[in-house]
Amino acid sequence: RHKLAQPWSAKDKVVLITGASSGIGRSLAHLFAKQEDALINVANECRDQYGATKVVTIKCDVSDENDVSKLIKTVEDSFNKLDCLILNAGVSMGERFESISDYKMIKTIMDINYFGSTYITYKALNLLKNSKGGRIVVDAVKTEINDNRLGKSPSKLDMTSAMSSDECANIIYKGVVRGDKEILFVARGKFARMMEGVFPDAWSYLTRKYSWKAVASNS
């Protein structure tokens, strides 16, 4: 996947990161330079510890189109450009589909995880196009985000074999700079991708098996 990569420098670039108050988003903010107070702390760290010259923090509900419009307007007014968009904001669910007591939970997940990403991408598209080589990074990983997920509380399984947010952020950052089209974090993921193409039935079986195992541990 490195053959088609287009190297990219983060120097003097404007990077917009959603979900930057904690976890991977916070770590990515550090490498590239919850509450509003947490965002301000991240901004101060980026300036004081990592030498970022200008950091703007914006409290935004990514599922709200008006909030997203204000977010992109602030980026444009503050920098007049956008070089990299990192879609990191998201929530997850800690129970089986048939156990859900309120279907609104599904809508909330879709509004944040799917429509939240599409809203921002759509609104930011012109700025990214104008940057001539803008990057859009979509991360899909299971990390400390489970502490805030909807439904049942996280199980001990979440805290055992997890990669730290700093490690995840470092892998993502290096991939962006290298210009990678796709990043598979762990050996299991790489093996699964290979199986998906060569042994699709086996891949489907293992996916179901591990998914049920993970959900059952939360029951």
Image (spheres, rainbow, N blue to C red):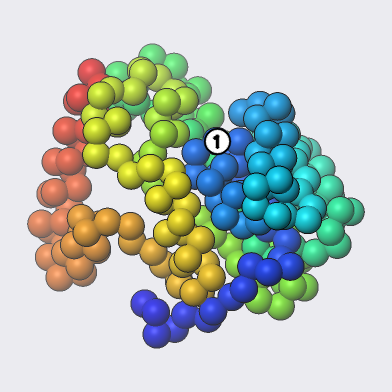
* Residue sitting nearer the eye, 207 or 99: 207
Position of residue 104 measured from the top left corner of the image (x, y, whole percent): 50, 23
Quarter holding residue 31: bottom right
* Residue sitting nearer the eye, 89 or 55: 55
The relative height of residue 199 versus residue 98 in the rendered view (above or below) is below
The relative height of residue 38 versus residue 169 in the rendered view (above or below) is above
Q: Residue at x 65, y 76 (%)?
A: 133
Position of residue 50 measured from the top left corner of the image (x, y, whole percent): 65, 52
Position of residue 111 measured from the top left corner of the image (x, y, whole percent): 57, 36
Q: Residue at x 17, y 41 (%)?
A: 210
Give the quadrant of the N terminus: bottom left
Count the marks. 1
The relative height of residue 201 versus residue 22 in the rendered view (above or below) is below
Position of residue 5 measured from the top left corner of the image (x, y, whole percent): 47, 80
Q: Residue at x 52, y 67 (%)?
A: 176
* Residue sitting nearer the eye, 48 or 192: 48
Give the quadrant of the C terminus: top left
Left or right position of 41 against 171: right
- Residue 121 can be seen, yes or no: no
Left or right position of 173 against 96: right
Residue at the top extreme, as displayed: 101
- Residue 78 can be seen, yes or no: yes
Q: Element under label 1?
A: loop
Quarter holding residue 142: top left
The three-letter code of the residue at mark 1 reads: Ser
Q: Residues within 10 Å of mark 1 (few under 14, many from 20)?
A: some
Label 1 sits on residue: 22
